[in-house]
Image: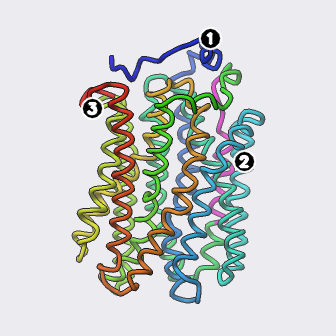
Amino acid sequence: MSTEDKQEVSPATSQLHLPPKDEEQDQHLDGWQGWLVVAAASCSLFVYMGVIYSWGIIQANIVENSSISLTSLTFVGSLATSCMCSLSIPVGKLVRRFGYRKTGIAGAIFLGLGEFLSSWVTDHLPALFITHGVLFGIGGGLTILPCSTAPLKWFKHRRGLATGVVFGAASLGAAVIGVVTHQLVAQVGVPWTFRILAFLLWAICLPAACMLKQPPGAKASIPKLQWFRWKEAKFLILFIGSSLGCFPLFVPSYFIPIFARALSTSSSFSIIALTIWNIASTIGRVGAGYVADSRLGALNTFIISLFLCGISALAIWPFATNLGLLIFFSIVNGIGCGSFFSLFTTVLGSVFGPENTMGILPIMWAGWFFGFFFGTPIAAQLYTAAGTNVNVTAYRPAAYYAGAMSVVGIAFILLLKMKRNKQVTSQA
């Protein structure tokens, strides 16, 4: 057994660990009821993350048909994205008080409301910040945490696979909703695209939220936020490393639709590349969960995911002068970015113990706010500073920035790996 699986227990921390599972709860673990919860969470994230990743398509159309700058629009999308993590601490308290179901229902209502109201203000930047950025963002915050953690309660041996399926559905949704959004924008325009997405969010996320629950007897097992972890070096290293590593995660999905137009005037060119990126992300999320469970371990697989993000942005994207290279970049980067999301809860369980995941995850996610909010706008500003010429050279500063941030993130995760196991090649 790897040293990562050994947990240090002290009197100060043992009180925060979960009480032993009773027989009633154990008999429900790894069964069909758990997979129903996985299916419900998957449906919600299929639509929600599909809309999140489709913002690049919508923003490209708004930039072409209005005076709003690319950097400003990336801030709108980044605000919506960052809310799903920055709200994790108060949402965690809501989950403990009201449960997964009620929290998820509130999230579904806000998701649809934000997109529906956005349909009336597509030419007004401040209003878009409120509707898509804040309202839709709040809905995301109320949705992502329940959908990410509720399935974990139902599994003892296949946590990585269950998480991978949930987040794999998110990437698959990004691919499907991306194609749908592309067609809707072309045929009915941005306003009606927002409205249709709003009704889709309500139609799927509301029923799915009603199915989110935890095993019988598990309510008392929901831990409080473990603020004492700030005193632990391994917590600080993982907090900093993951926070830096998430800066470039949404750069490809927001920039591929615009970057593709530097290679071809065909509108189908961009949607092909973005769809391939999303499909690769789906493979990464599901495959990484399996690999983490049965092959390499969570931490080793997490390091590989960051490596794929970094190497693809540094060595492939800057030189993607044709569709073939862009597709190659989309595959490698998509696998890396997708596995980052699905692996993180498993990494927390591996490092701190599965019973402590819910008490630590909201704190970790809150630290991702800066990466999600500033990560893509920084890339947009670098692109603008390069002159926004219609050629690939204008995108190289943004690509190098994205790759560099992934490399810095890897350094911290390797430090954590070496600190815990002393050998980087040992199983996580």
- Magenta span: predominant SS is helix
Q: Where does the magenta region start and end? A: 198-215
Question: Residue 73 colored magenta?
Answer: no
Question: Residue 212 colored magenta?
Answer: yes
> What is the quadrant of residue 62 in the picture?
bottom right
Q: Earlier in the sequence, mark 2 or mark 3?
A: 2
- Identify which amino acid the numbered label 2 is placed on: Ile
> Which residue is depicted at the point 53% across and 46% down?
42
Give left or right: position of 100 versus 9.
Answer: right
> Which residue is depicted at the point 67% across and 70% down?
129
Q: For the residue labelled by badge 1, is the local secondary structure a helix, a strand or a loop?
A: loop
> What is the quadrant of residue 154 in the picture?
top right
Name the residue that disc number 3 marks. Answer: 424
Are discs 2 and 1 less than 8 Å apart at CB? Answer: no
Q: CA distance from mark 2 to mark 1?
A: 29 Å
Mark nearest the camera among 1 and 3 is 3
Q: Earlier in the sequence, mark 2 or mark 1?
A: 1
Image location (x, y in percent) of residue 360: 58, 33
Image location (x, y in percent) of residue 98: 77, 36
> What is the quadrant of residue 428 in the picture?
top left
Name the residue that disc number 2 marks. Answer: 105
Are discs 2 and 3 less than 8 Å apart at CB? Answer: no
- Identify which amino acid the numbered label 3 is placed on: Val
Q: CA distance from mark 1 to mark 3?
A: 37 Å
Q: CA distance from mark 2 to mark 3?
A: 43 Å
Q: How many marks?
A: 3
Q: Earlier in the sequence, mark 1 or mark 3?
A: 1
The circle drawn on residue 22 is 1
| Residue 33 seen in the current view | no
Specify few, some or many for label 3: CA neighbours under 10 Å numbering under 14, 14-19, or 20 or more. Answer: some
